[in-house]
Amino acid sequence: MSRVSVPCHVKGTVALQVGDVRTSQGRPGVLVIDVTFPSVAPFELQEIMFKNYYTAFLTIRVRQHTSTHTPAKWVTCLRDYCLMPDPHSEEGAQEYVSLFKHQMLCDMAQVLELRLILRQPSPLWLSFTVEELQIFQQGPKSPSMTFPKWLSHPVPCEQPTPLLEGLPDPSRVSSEVQQMWALTEMIRASHTSTRIGRFDVDGCYDLNLLSYT
Amino acid sequence: MLQEESDLSLIIAQIVQKLKGSNLYAQLERQAWASLQRPEIKLESLKEDIKEFFKISGWEKKLQNAVYSELSVFPLPSHPAAPPEHLKEPLVYMRKAQGSWEKRILKSLNSMCTELSIPLARKRPVGEQKELLNKWNEMGTDEPDLSLFRPVYAPKDFLEVLINLRNPNYESGDSLSFRTHLGLIQVPLKVKDIPELKEFFVELGLTTGQLGIDDSTQVPPELFENEHVRIGQKVLTQQDSAAAQQYIRQGSPTALRAELWALILNISSHPEDILYYEQLKTNVIQHDLLVDSLIYKDVKLTASNDDYYFVFEDYLYQVLLCFSRDTSVLSHFAYNSASPPKSYIRGKLGLEEYAVFYPPNGVIPFHGFSMYVAPLCFLYHEPSKLYQIFREMYVRFFFRLHSISSHPSGIVSLCLLFETLLQTYLPQLFYHLREIGAQPLRISFKWMVRAFSGYLATDQLLLLWDRILGYNSLEILAVLAAAVFAFRAVNLMEVTSLAAAEAVLADLSTLKVMPLLQIFLFATVT
């Protein structure tokens, strides 16, 4: 299904740490990233896509627009989603990840704001974050067309004319021809991407030095 | 789930796209057209009848084998937003390290080129072409002056690069802490531990029959060997790649090995393949490459000096020289972290339409490269078949042994797996060797880079390579390396220098591979 990117504003990450950030020795293991959508009305979220950078677990909270006058509350829509199966090793550390609507715990119909809570319990990494964050909403549905009347309401068929002797049934022939036509269309549409196998340019393989770029 | 369905259709679409350009596709088309003559194919149920015909005539099996081959070789399609570099290697710092290593190799090759004033490539004059064609089957008798050539790099240079590999996001303080790795490799890749290896290599367990153990002279053949050979023949008649791969995990009988490997690698000798090999031979005769001299030098230094392989010297030239001209090897760079070196036609520097890859297959051989081919000469005597098998083995396995990547079968992971196994299960030995300045990886690295070729006796090596094919993974090399250290642990505990440790481990030709692996994985008390 089609999707459309939603322009979002990603605020700077905020580290959550116990104690004083300046004096304590350890590095924060929890980061919070707020994502707002300043120029867009509340929309239905389809997909969240990003590139991981050493984040082990991801929790997402969402604030949705409510029709009543009650203030919008934060709801957790994804809890402790595992991005790195072993937080101490490199597996999954720089992977591209997509999260879809159907993976969320709640309905994402009227999203106002998102809050990504990143966790990395391992002390081995100097920093962690998510990069290239993109939010997508449902793309426009294909526009409904109005069919001409004779397509949507076919005329009831008249009594077929009696078959001439010796000729095959026309409906059978037409279905067979249709199958053959479909096969030929498929063959025509296929194309191959194999190389030819020549390594020289017009018979010449006289080279300069190897290039470093 | 929605995601899995779309993943599956993406994989199917990719495999179909790849197979469309292959020989098999053309053959299936021809067969389908020819089958229209048959009485059982009716026009109204054309599709189903042809499918039934393929099933009965064995063509469906060939297609299954081709699909299985594609699945084994190519990685699963990654996220649609991932750029092609990500498929080659997901970790950015490893891509950078591979890039700088490649640059060093190119500089070395360029400087050799300018020092010796030899062009990278030149067209052979007609007289020389005729001469080479006459001498094709005995190129070993040629004694060109190769004293000025030196190998572009040796495994120990590559080891130094791996030792200096660092993740910039990894905490590595100066003082020793729980973060420092005690071995030489300092990157925190995920490697399997022994319980996971036991599960992965379950067919090597103590209760399963193995060739290499249960076919020794003391064991009556009725217990295991006869039945195993019978099953092997059945697998070959069925021509099923997946079944062959499962079967070979317990080893392959010597008589069936050549056919089994060809079945697993999905190699069949059609006239088109022989023609392709002849075309490569023509390319070798027409153009002379600098890389050819490197290959000559490597063969003379390694395989020619080996007691088992010197007889195959001529075959090695025939395979390796053709391998350098084979542009179909370029397609494996899609999933290899390395990239082929580029050059421009003389006088057209910078013009993209005159950019070419050098060598045509993009692979620059290093010292010991010919040892990847040598063991295969025992199995295949027909040059084009030998060539195809080697090429397929290279683009499936051997390329991982000399490029920097985070793949579980990549050389970095193998080194880390070896060091971790040794540290965890032989801590006293590891500590002792480290204290005397003999880091174990310095000794075992050369074994793993060559996949033990030239170090083990040939029959043992082929049993080991059976398992590489059967499990579609090179991790067994690291496990064997650790098992060898475990076997010679008593002697190693008494040495006091790196040279003495090397001497203890210098000769592996008497080792029996399968008992070592079995004991290390399944019978060591931890």
Image (cartoon, coloured by chain):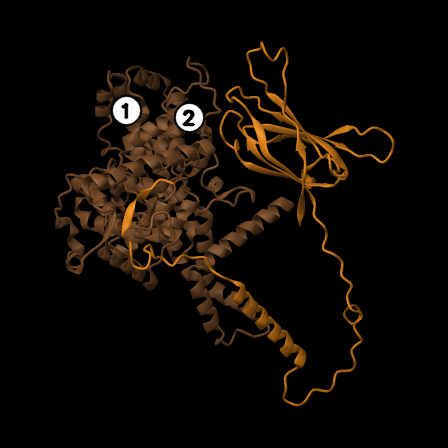
Element type at marker 1? Answer: loop
Chain drawn orange in the picture:
A
Residue at image coords 55%, 11%:
A25
Dot 2 corresponds to which residue? B166
**Is B2 situated above or below B64?**
above
B414 relative to B324 in the view: left or right: right
- Identify which amino acid the numbered label 1 is placed on: Arg
Residue at the right extreme of this rendering = A69
Q: Nearer the viewer, mark 1 or mark 2?
A: 2
Location of residue A165 by image quarter: bottom right
- Identify which amino acid the numbered label 2 is placed on: Arg
Earlier residue among tags 1 and 2? 2
Give me the disc on residue B488: 1
Rendered-image quadrant of the N terminus of chain B: top right
Q: Is residue B414 visible?
A: yes
Chain drawn brown in the picture:
B
In the depicted view, which residue is nearer to us: B212 or B242?
Answer: B242
Residue at image coords 26%, 44%:
B375
Specify the subunit that label 1 lies on.
Answer: B
Specify the subunit that label 2 lies on.
Answer: B
Residue at image coords 26%, 57%:
B283
